[in-house]
Amino acid sequence: MMKDQSLRQSFLGPHSEDVFKASKIGFIGLGGGGSHIVQQWAHLGGGNFTIIDFDVIEATNLNRLVGATLEDVKNSELKTSIAKRVIKNINPDADVKVFNKPWQEVSDQLRDCDLIFGCVDSYQARRDLEIFCRRFLTPYIDIGMDVYEMENGYSISGQVIMSIPGSICMHCMQYLREDLLEKEAARYGDAGGKPQVVWPNGILASTAVGLAVQLLNPWHPNPPGSVYLEYDGVTNTINVSPRMEYLAHTQCHHFFNTEGMGDPFYLLRSKK
Amino acid sequence: MKIAFKMTDRFLKIVRTDLNRRHPYAAERVGFIACTVTPLPNEGWIIMANEYHPVADEDYLNDWTVGAMMGPAAIRKALQIAYSSGKSMFHVHMHEHSGRPRFSKVDLSESQKFIPDFWNVQPDIPHGTLLLSHNEVVGMCWVPDQPIIQSVTDITITGSPLLRFWRNA
């Protein structure tokens, strides 16, 4: 029998409550985007969270970090602590594993995740996360937004990408490109605080959660494969990237070699 | 102990297509999956399917008492793959029905005869056997230093949708 918390979402199917409870989900980055996603996943009934962020909250985060308070800023609270509090206030029984380190240092904790959300702020970080997810056959959902200064004001754009192992990747979609990665590496340390606002993060996070629900618990037919959605914050629209039309029948040529699976150092270590 | 097995939906389709081929005299087909394995942080393993190796037509024995009986050449070739690639090996076959399949007594007794042999060539990693039905997958696993054969606790078919088969589901 469904809990009261799940009754209004019973149309998602008789097993949806069990699916959300049992699924182990990784959340990398708990800032503007990630804080929305963990909150929504807790509301859905998520029971198994691995949350990773080494950062503490600052006053500049208060404009968008869901669940954060002025008191948290005064206490320089860890973003993971805020996220855990949000989750536990909704789902006291949820299993929340907290890691206050760069994800690469605790990546072994992500190996058996059913799905990983990446809310990181660089192309390099996205590339590293996608490579990790492909190694462990884990679907990866990425969100991000940017504010650009134009001649006559500002523009907001963003993306929601779902990268499913066996299907096309973020390189195939040309969201990740070598020239962008090189450009980013060249201005390393020079980025400063990028402009961010709460509502695009909310839109992108909600879209990402919708994709995750459909992936893990398909409640309507024809679930999409890999997805690349583009957000336009000026027109308030989300559309499938035009690039996807050309990739409809394409196979990924970046992650086709199964030799790259798993922990590449495991056997080397174990044989020492 | 958590033992998670993952493969893509595309990979599973390749396996099913092969197992569905008619054999000249055996009633069913079998194959081997070479897998990458990685330990989980506390306890357990994650096993990922890499390559499918069908058993060659000539490597079946003509034994009418079972659906398919592999000859020594089939086992030898699988051992060679494990030895030269460093992979974990999973035997695979299919039962022709929908719903959760169950290993028969013969399945388990025959598997017990040859799966531990993979430890002669790859001793530090688990090996096992998978059983498919038309729409589900179950597995058994021989884990180093474990006296009892383990069930594969989580099987994930990565694709869209993401299919998961939990032992206790």
Image: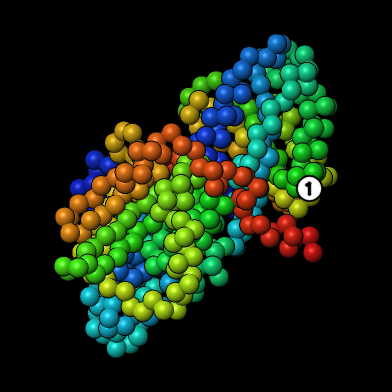
User: What coloring was used for the rendering?
Assistant: rainbow
Which residue is more in the foreground, A255 or A78?
Answer: A255
Q: Residue at x 39, y 49 (%)?
A: A162
Residue drawn at 46 percent across, 75 percent down: A188
B120, A223: nearer the viewer: A223
Q: Which residue lies most toward the front here? A: A151
**Where residue B114 sits: x, y (%)?**
78, 34
Q: For the view shown, which residue lies furthest in the bottom direction? A: A74
Question: How many dots with numbers?
Answer: 1
For residue A57, what is the image quadrant?
Answer: bottom left
Left or right of A184 on screen, residue B92: right
Horizontally, is A253 left or right of B123 in the view? left
Residue A114 showing in the rendered view:
no
Q: Residue at x 38, y 57 (%)?
A: A142
Question: What amino acid does circle 1 point to?
Answer: Gln
Residue at image position (65%, 34%) is B52
Report the residue marked by disc 1.
B122
B60 vs A246: above or below: above
Residue B77: image location, x then y, percent: 80, 32
Asked whether B34 or B64 is in front, the reply is B34
Q: Quadrant of the N terminus of chain A?
A: top left
Residue in front for this viewpoint, B22 or A122: A122
